[in-house]
Amino acid sequence: MGSGKAFLKEIQAGDNEMNINQLQEELDTNIFTVSFSSLGEKDRQNQVVHQGDPLYCQNCKGILNKFSNLSLFNNSGSCLQLSWNCEFCTHLNEIQIQDGDIPEKEEALYLIQSHFQQQSQKQEKNSITFCIDTSGSMSTTTEIKGKVSIKTGLTNKEQEMLKQFIQPGTEAHYLKKQKQISYVSRKQCLLSAIEQQIKKLQQQNPEKVVGLVTFNNEVVVYGDGSQQPIKFQEQELYQEVQIKTVLSRCANQMMQNPISKQADNIINICEQLQDNGQTALGPALISALELAKVGKPGSMIIICTDGLANLGIGALDSESSKRFYQELGKMAAEKGIIISLVTIKGEGCKIDTLGELVERTNGIVTRVNPEKIGEDFANIINDVVVGTQVELKVILHKALKFRREDLIKAENNTLKKYIGNVTKSTLQTFEYELKSEQELKKENIDIKKLKQIPFQIRITYTNLKGDRMMKVVTKLVQTTQNKVEAEKSAQVEVIHKRLAQKTAQIAKKGNYEEAQTYNQNWNQYLQKNPHINNNQINQQKNLIYQKHNEKLSTAIKNQEVRKQKSMCFSEIEQKGNSLKQNSEPFNSKEINNENSESILFGNSQSINTPLNKEKNSKRIDQNEYKQQKFDTPGSQSSSKIEFKKISSNTISTIDSNFINRKTNSSQDSSSSNQSDEDQDQATLYFYDKGQF
Ligand SMILES: [Zn+2]
């Protein structure tokens, strides 16, 4: 809960200002988060599973719970006949229930279908499959200061490559320098990270099956390392059906030995890997999926790549690739398989397309320096799956409605969401508010009588044993009509999660301006509100969050600039075409001028100009904080400087890009642009997950 108290706004009939406020965004502590960590095995063992089925309200489908208002009207043996005045919709239900089956705790667990009843359920363990890029770019080296423990030495070829960078006559200097600085290739970093994880799994999870698939010009499927590897080359890389058929025949055999037996074997294979050629990611992913399907739901695929998939099906330079990865993500999610993506900084790999695939399976997208790959692998592997095919339903009291949810009608107080796989750190955030005066009148609700209101979440999921379960959590929250009172018991970390997640979600749809406005309004509210910040703990938490928020909003600003730029390009192209059509001479100078003009116009809309900022703060002022002044003149002038700086940067980048395009040497520049964009995309994915 964003606050220990639910804020029910006082309604004053005929108040004009109230009507104005309604059009604007409400800023308050009416926020809550839903986490799924308690679905995990350990917690489950301590929980009582209810014998009977959950009892639903006939009217609103809320579920009978600890707080339900019951009165007995007949008692025949162990079966009770009760009347239940539903706490969500006030409907009067007549129910029959076994004595002792009325929930006594806030959390209640029900078994919907046992795995014994689901015959198709496989009994194998779940697995981890590493899907590893061994293309040529993986031999790119990085300087690492200080000592690093990379066991795998440089190959002869890599040593030759390094020599190119040493000026003749400076070998001594280079060697001296070598003592403090190590040069390691991406491949070395990756392999040592895999080795590290395999050793850890060997100790902590010896029964786990670990599979390996590598890709460059060919795809090599090693499985657990016990069988002869299977290779796909050339034309085979375009035959999705053939790859699937070949592997479905032998995947069982290739994924049967636990890591306790196979660790040395896999490490050996890794040490022999050579990196060269292109990046056949698509066919490798199909192969990895075939291996992962052998295990039961909760299996993982970890893709590690440093470049653009450019060979075989799913090559990202083809138009159909987006669809291909979407389908693959859907297929994996249905099987309860999580796919995570670790990309290495330096080159572009189109995170927007691959990210969608990962998101569908609820995996993690990261972008790291080569020496950090190990940390990432550990985070991914530790974030275990706790449930698959997860459906979430949230029920609010009928006086409330959800705020800022696209999926549902505004007046609705229930929300259903299909989530698919969940890990122990999966997080969902919601905002709610009081219904409008009219709506409340229509439903005959007097909020003055609502001293406390119930919230209920219902999670229907398949656990790792294959049982279909339902978990119902009901909480009763005190209400207040005094906003300050709610703010005084604010839980800022809940608001942080919501703010970051919602901002990232809006931005991921390409609505960068909207995301920035949302973010700025809420962040100012959070940082400047005297009641929320009336204690040191909240102040400190706010300060820490500030760093996250800066990262997030920088990524969004960058994306907005890119959007403006690409809009500008298509404009230029159109103009260029029409110029050509009119058979006028192609004058690049003239077009460049046009170019800078429209960029200035675009930015004045997108980046927070003093004018915009004034508008925003005015809006907040009207929102009951008249005594509060949000913008000092100083902060306005600094935002002005920022605005100027960004727009001049943009122009110079565009100019150089424009020249690059004309001289047809845009390869390097577009690759590094893609890499920067991937970085910002990864930031959005990170904050959307709310796992910070
Ligand atoms: Zn009801």
Image (tube, helix red, strand yellow):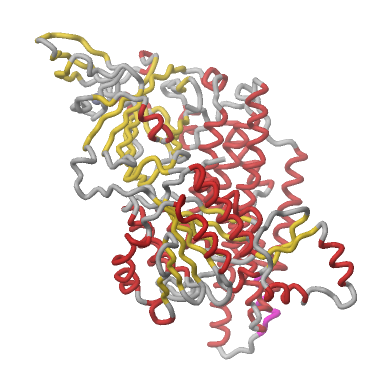
Q: Position of residue 77 (x, y in %)?
A: 10, 10
Q: Is residue 601 visible?
A: no
Q: Magenta part mainly helix, strand or loop?
A: helix
Reply yes or no: does residue 674 show up in magenta: no
Q: Residue at x 74, y 72 (%)?
A: 162
Residue 597, compared with residue 479, is above or below; it is: below
Residue 273, compared with residue 260, is above or below; it is: below
Which corner quadrant of the image does residue 180 belong to? Answer: bottom right
Looking at the rendering, the quadrant in which ligand 1 lies is top left
Range of residues picked out in magenta? 587-595
Q: Is residue 434 visible?
A: yes
How many numbered marks does the figure carry? 0
Q: Residue at x 32, y 71 (%)?
A: 246
Horizontally, residue 369 falls left or right of residue 685, namely: right
Horizontally, residue 398 falls left or right of residue 133, namely: left
Residue that extends furthest to the left in the rendered view of this protein: 76
Horizontally, residue 289 falls left or right of residue 661, namely: left
Q: Position of residue 165 (x, y in %)?
A: 78, 74
Q: Position of residue 238 (x, y in %)?
A: 39, 77
Which corner quadrant of the image does residue 447 belong to? Answer: top left
- The residue lying toward the viewer, choosing from 492 and 102, is 102
- The residue lying toward the viewer, choosing from 87 and 689, is 689
Q: Position of residue 475 (x, y in %)?
A: 38, 22
- The residue lying toward the viewer, choosing from 464 and 584, is 464
Q: Residue at x 54, y 82 (%)?
A: 578
Which corner quadrant of the image does residue 448 belong to? Answer: top left
Quarter the C terminus occupies: top right
Residue 49, compared with residue 376, is above or below; it is: above
Q: Residue at x 69, y 74 (%)?
A: 156
